[in-house]
Amino acid sequence: MTATGFDQDVGVIGGCGHVGLPLALTFADKGQRVVIYDIDERALAHVRGGTMPFDEDGAPAMLQRVLAAGRLTCTADPAALAACRALILIIGTPVDEHLNPALDAIPKALDLCRPSLRDGQLLVLRSTVFPGTSARVQRWVEERGLDIDVSFCPERVAQGYSLREFGELPQIVSAFEPRGLAAARALFGLLTADLVEMAPMEAEVAKLFTNAWRYVQFATANQFFMMAQSHGLDFYRILEGSRFKYPRLAGMP
């Protein structure tokens, strides 16, 4: 072990997916020692072999680079997370058939990883969650007598362009204690100098606002497309003419 007690810098739980893998690669490319933990053995095999399991602009070269540098470890064993100073949990909140949030996904993941959680770690929630989830995770940690800082730092990038946007977009950081906030700032400050501090529930709701706004934009554009189609009209011709030198429609997808 190092002087700080941690041999690795970052562990990404669920790290082979569209959200986790680009983040893991970026941290590794910034010089961090990164552990990817995932239960998808096929995806792990791809990453270990230097092949991206999905398309992401710039990722193949970055994957090769960090593997060659020895800064990326891939495993299906959660025990490897015990060596990581910061853990980033990439698990969202699924919904049932009635669109009600199922709140047990994150506790189940934490229970699985419990033997690897250690005092002094930073636990970052990254995906879309139901408001108040970070506070529930904080209570979960405290009830088990762990001295771990819980933080919510939402994902904000567009799939396929993550590597570029990590450096272009501000990162929202939050935590319940000053120590956790300082650790979150230090970690995500590796990606960008533009950091926005919020309270954890503010950050959770900001993530929901961002998602909902995008859904509304796409749903509206789809509805307009169907309206034009139902009248035998060319939607793209209408859109192009409507947006020409008219900034109020510039943001329509």
Image (cartoon, helix red, strand yellow):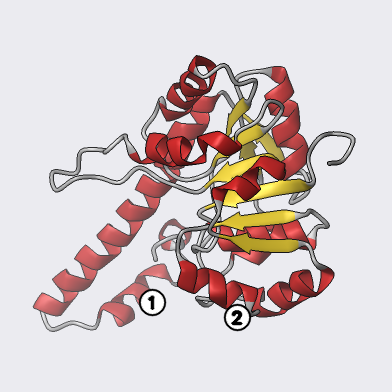
Using the image as rendered, state which of residue 207 and residue 68 is in the foreground. 68
x and y, in percent, of residue 212 in the image: 35, 46
User: In the picture, residue 187 is in which quadrant?
Assistant: top right
x and y, in percent, of residue 195 in the image: 70, 38
Q: Secondary structure at mark 2?
A: loop
* Residue beneath disc 1: 240
Q: Residue at x 60, y 34 (%)?
A: 117
- Quadrant placement of the C terminus: bottom left
User: In the picture, residue 51 is in which quadrant?
Assistant: bottom right
x and y, in percent, of residue 93 in the image: 35, 42
Q: Residue furthest left?
A: 230
Name the side, left or right, on which 33 lies relative to 238: right
Q: Residue at x 68, y 62 (%)?
A: 73
Above or below 242: residue 8: above
Q: How many marks?
A: 2
Q: Amino acid at mark 2?
A: Thr
The answer, for residue 181, to whether it is visible in the render is yes
Question: Do the residues under discs 1 and 2 have CB atoms within 8 angstroms?
Answer: no
Name the side, left or right, on which 215 lies relative to 7: left
x and y, in percent, of residue 221 in the image: 29, 64
Can you tell which mark lies on residue 51? 2
**Marks 1/2: CA–CA distance:** 39 Å
Q: Residue at x 16, y 71 (%)?
A: 226
